[in-house]
Amino acid sequence: MNAGLTGEARGDDDAQRVPQPTRVARSVARFARPTPRLAGVYDASDPRCEKIRALRTELLLRREPGDGAEVIALLSPGTGDGRSQLAAELAIAFAQLDRPTLLVDADLRHPSQHLLFAADNKAGLSQAIAHGTTPYFQPVEGLRHLSLLTAGPTPDNALELLLNRRFAALVEECRESFDFVVLDTAPITEYSDGLAVASLIKRVLVLSRARHTPYKESRDMLRRLAAIRSQIVGAVINHF
């Protein structure tokens, strides 16, 4: 994986933010558990581990001191680009800094974070938005600073839920409770969900897969993001 990050690198504020009381989080008893697909993040000898940490470092250097929580949405044109795995790996890498980190599966079409973490998906983001209930933030085994919000049952009105003011309110609550928030999204070529998330989050990391993602689709994604004035904090070409 090559990470080509756009923009001018800036120094990160090394002082850790004092975590605020979590007003929206409610953990379930069962821990999520990273599956072997995420093992490379833990193995320093694995080339992917070093790539993920390098990406994390570059993203941190691009933050303005005093910016508050870093909230990033991952977007890619289609399925098979490796977006969901990268979102999980990046969230793990942030949590390894001993900073409160939340991974949100905002792909309400074909969610996969619960599969990557062997997590319960009976309750998640879709229900929290639809019913205005407190979301279930699941703790992750072996990563005490990482929490997971799965997508929950697949709804019939995914786009409408992500445009709902309850989702916007939830994101703002998360900004106050975590230092890092990473959001997985649905493929942008097939659905407009990712644009809805990007228009709210503003800071996005875009992804394409070498010898897989059509150039036309990547170009169209960048055009659509420019139209909603999203800030592209990085561009990743996935070779794995």
Image (cartoon, grey):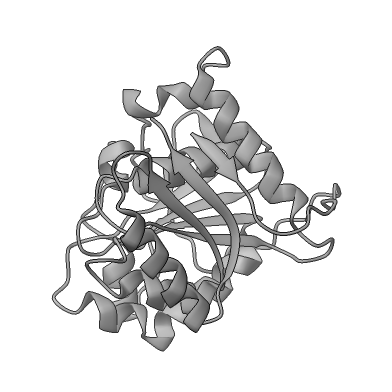
Q: Is residue 43 left or right of residue 55?
A: left
Q: Quadrant of residue 191?
A: bottom left
Q: Is residue 117 above or below residue 69?
A: above
Residue ID at (38%, 59%): 218
Q: Is residue 101 above or below residue 135?
A: above
Q: Position of residue 65 (x, y in %)?
A: 84, 61
Q: Is residue 39 left or right of residue 99?
A: left
Q: Is residue 114 above or below residue 181?
A: above
Q: Position of residue 211 (x, y in %)?
A: 32, 39
Residue ID at (31%, 49%): 213
Q: Nearer the viewer, residue 48 or 29?
A: 48
Q: Nearer the viewer, residue 209 or 129?
A: 209
Q: How many marks?
A: 0
Q: Residue furthest bottom?
A: 165
Q: Is residue 25 left or right of residue 108?
A: right
Q: Quadrant of residue 145?
A: top right
Q: Position of residue 156 (x, y in %)?
A: 13, 76
Q: Nearer the viewer, residue 12 or 102?
A: 12
Residue 237 visible in the current orientation: yes
Q: Position of residue 78 (x, y in %)?
A: 27, 56
Q: Residue furthest top?
A: 45
Residue ID at (49%, 28%): 142
Q: Split into 4 quadrants, where in the image is the C terminus?
A: top left
Residue 169 visible in the current orientation: no
Q: Is residue 115 above or below residue 198?
A: above
Q: Residue furthest left?
A: 156
